[in-house]
Image (cartoon, coloured by chain):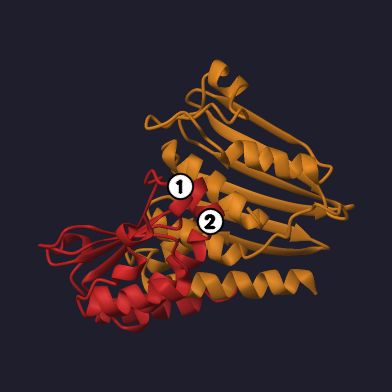
Amino acid sequence: MKSIEELKKIREETLKNINLRKEDNEHAVRVVVGMATCGIAAGARPVLAACLEEVQKRNLPDVAVTQTGCIGVCRLEPIVEVFAPGEEKVTYVKMTPEKARRVIAEHVVNKQVVTEYTIGAAE
Amino acid sequence: MKELSLHILDIAMNSVKAGASLVEIGLEEAGGTLTLTVADNGRGMEPEFLASVADPFTTTRTTRKVGMGIPLLKLAAEQAGGAFSIESAPGEGTALTASFQTGHLDNPPLGDMAATLVSLIQGSPGIDFTYTHTAGGGVSSLDTRELRAALDGVPLDTPDVLAWIQNSIEEEERGLSQ
């Protein structure tokens, strides 16, 4: 490994800016990406990467991005589900990295569901 | 699946679901053949399940009776003039090998191994992964046990750590292809 030293620096920085662990926070919004065979084949990996990047870039400590298996509607993959406290789950289908960035900005940050990408609009 | 790295992501998820604490991914390029190995210390498979594991109508899922991951990898290898094999025993884990003829017209590109490793580690930060890719005398590698030791309590799915992994693997993979 080239730069374990860099990792140690990251460790110190992380400990300095320690946030509440997202999973323990009941106010956390969960963004769940379907990462089974169907999701991966349809392009879920760059969608996951876009969600992670957007959450990091916007510094959203109350947002947890997680992965799950097959959600059950493989033909609509990649699928992203958003669980916000006190709201019904919203299922976004046929996602792309661009759509995922918009969902983070409009739904997760500004609380406006992006209706045109939801499973209701697709079906 | 357009890239071998996507198959690897999908197949390594099987190891995660099998309760493995260590998943070892190997890629070896030599003499026109690329050999992929994925080995885990998960719960392993009974001989009857193993015998039919490359059949798409064999799966551990309970919601429906189709599992495409292993059949798709097997098909990709065979279409590229390669071979597929899998060994497993209950309690002893599973080891899978798929080979590809790199000069074959239908050989899939490797794709973004950094993104695959980051996705795996982000999804299962409590599991250890090793990755060793050898080609033309060079090596690209990762061992989360070493990272874990250096991070000393800071989780592997910390965004800055994931970014470090992505950059580090990208750099090493670039070094291999030169």
Visible in this render: residue B13?
A: yes
Residue B148 higher or lower than B170, as above or below: above
Quarter of the rendering containing residue B172: bottom right
Q: Nearer the viewer, residue A5 or A66?
A: A66
Q: Nearer the viewer, residue A69 or A71?
A: A71
Residue B137 falls left or right of residue B70: right
Residue B109 falls left or right of residue A84: right
Q: Where's the N terminus of chain A, which quadrant?
A: bottom right
Label 2 element class = helix
Q: Nearer the viewer, residue A119 or B151?
A: A119
Q: CA distance from mark 2 to mark 1?
A: 9 Å
The chain containing the residue under callout 2 comes to: A
Residue B41 higher or lower than A13, as above or below: above
Label 2 close to label 1 by CB (< 8 Å) = yes
Label ID, residue A74: 1
Quarter of the rendering containing residue B96: top right
From the image, state the color of chain A: red
- Per the image, the residue denoted by label 2 is A42
Residue found at x 54% / y 48%: B10
Give the residue furthest to the left. Answer: A86
Label ID, residue B152: none
Please state which amino acid type lies under the numbered disc 2. Ala
Bin the neighbour count of mark 2 within 10 Å (Cα to Cα): few under 14, some 14-19, many 20 and up. Answer: many
Residue found at x 75% / y 69%: B176
Tell me the orange chain.
B
Residue found at x 74% / y 58%: B134
Image position, residue A12 (x, y; %): 33, 79
Image position, residue A41 (x, y; %): 56, 53
Image position, residue B24 (x, y; %): 58, 47
